[in-house]
Amino acid sequence: MILGKKNIFLILVCFFSANFAFSQEQIGLKMSNYGGVNSIGINPAWSANGPYKWDLNIVSLGAFFDNDYLFVQKGSLLKFLLKSNSIIPNPAIKKPKGNIEKPVFYNYEDRYKTYDLYQNLTLLGPAFMYNFPNHSVGISYNIKEVFYLHEIAKDFGYYYFSDSATTQMVTGPLRTGVMTWGELGFNYAGVVMNNGLQELTVGLTAKYLMGFDAVVGKSNEESVIVKIDEGVKLASGNVDLNYATNYAYDYEAEDWKYKLNRNGNGFGLDFGIAYTNKLTTVDQPHKFKIGVSILDVGRIKYFKNATTTKYVRNDTVTFMNDDFKEVRDIDLFIDKVGQIAYGDSNALRTGTTFTSWLPTALSVQADFAVRENVYISAFGMMRMPRKGLGVDRENIIAVTPRYEKRKWEVGVPIVLYDFKRPRMGAYARLWNVTIGTDNFLSWFIPVPKWSGTDFYIGFKVNPKEEIDYLRSKKRGKAPKNFRCPKF
């Protein structure tokens, strides 16, 4: 990335106005009765006594991007891919050069609210689960990458920001974080109560965490940025920013380099409980099932390639674009800010180790049998507060009607993302291959403002036959030795 004219504004927006979180829960892979080892990701107890003796995930991949800052007019993912060379700014932003046949325009939201940008990539590599009667054990390896800009101040909307009459922009006290890490997880789930008609299961996943990259920080007070010719004035600032990264810019070769190294480690924990009511009159594993889980409790300590910084000024400091025109990486950026603000390129640096918290969340799940092979599931995820620096998770509510059989399955998730963005998804499974999205319309159907998309895909292997004692043909009748409890 080359920092040209006005790019210092973007750096300051990210530096003072960002909040990153975790996205995309891959509902079709995890809420199904055939979810197997993938279901451990939403509740460590959810997959105990599942339909398989064992379940091996070969690979599952999920990607997500969405924002409410920039959009493609009358766009879709298909249109974006097919006409990527014809996407140009709306003439209201910039007059196009030359003639482009059937151009596709992009535009910006106007200044009327705060802005958000969400992006993440999740890779579940080899993962294995084995079911014993009333117990299950599993092992998994994940790589996760998270990026989330939350509540970018409306003063930084494109049209307001670009207006020559605009001079002052205000940011609030916000948190920031971006992180890439790996997880080696060990899962155990066990049935603690089973009377033939009801079942209570608890589960735990202990995770060894490998931290690769992280940028986490917070602005501790409101800041005022004043725009001037070829630069900005920062009226005040109180910012903590810590980072550890494997990215490096080779200034001689003028090229970015990335070498994957573990820059930190830590431990994490998932805990869950699930209740199953099996009093069903059809050949189904349950009448209804509900669960509660707490996910991603833990943190990573970064100690390699790690830097902690602090910027505190109560007076006005002027930053000019020319001061940053040669900046390509975060280290040189910190040097430049320190030199300009304090006369010392090392003035912002305060240490070489820091910790970053995982995106802890409370999750609630429910699954109801409507008729044979027909289910409706409900899923909720809410981020939990934390005091330390780290990354946050999104809030999400989803209701998913589905039809499932051993050979195939289809579902239509209705999702409310972060309590303000409704969307409709779709997924399908054929034997052990699943593909889906939580935003189906964004794939094919042009919408007035196309601002992002998502997808997930999974491949697994498991036995052809289901476990007989888990799917009895006799439902709805209590076993002969069953007795009601006495009070």
Image (cartoon, helix red, strand yellow):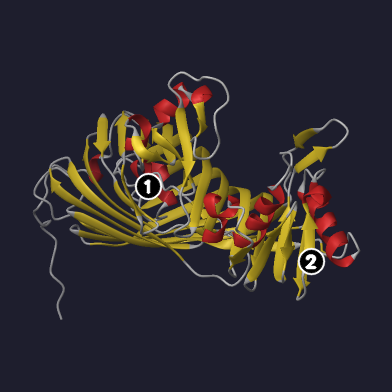
Q: Secondary structure at mark 2?
A: strand
Label 1: which residue? 132
Q: Position of residue 278 (x, y in %)?
A: 18, 54
Which label was assigned to residue 317? 2
Label 1, residues with CA under 10 Å away: few <14, some 14-19, many ≥20: some
Q: Is residue 57 left or right of residue 387?
A: left
**Quarter location, residue 5:** top right
**Quarter location, residue 314:** bottom right
Up-down relation of residue 331 to residue 363 (above or below): above
Up-down relation of residue 196 to residue 62 (above or below): below
Q: Secondary structure at mark 1?
A: strand
Q: Residue furthest front?
A: 165
Quarter of the image for the N terminus: give it: top right
Residue 353 visible? The answer is yes
Q: Position of residue 318 (x, y in %)?
A: 79, 62
Q: Residue furthest bottom?
A: 487
Q: Disc 1 vs disc 2: which is toward the camera?
A: 2
Q: Nearer the viewer, residue 258 or 268?
A: 258
Q: Residue furthest right?
A: 344
The amino acid on which the numbered mark 2 sits, given as a three-letter code, is: Val
Quarter of the image for the C terminus: give it: bottom left
Mark toward the start of the polypeptide (1 vs 2):
1
Q: Position of residue 423 (x, y in %)?
A: 32, 46
Residue 61 visible? The answer is no
Disc 1 to disc 2: CB gap under 8 Å: no
Q: Is residue 279 left or right of residue 116?
A: left
Question: Residue at left 14%, top 77%?
Answer: 486
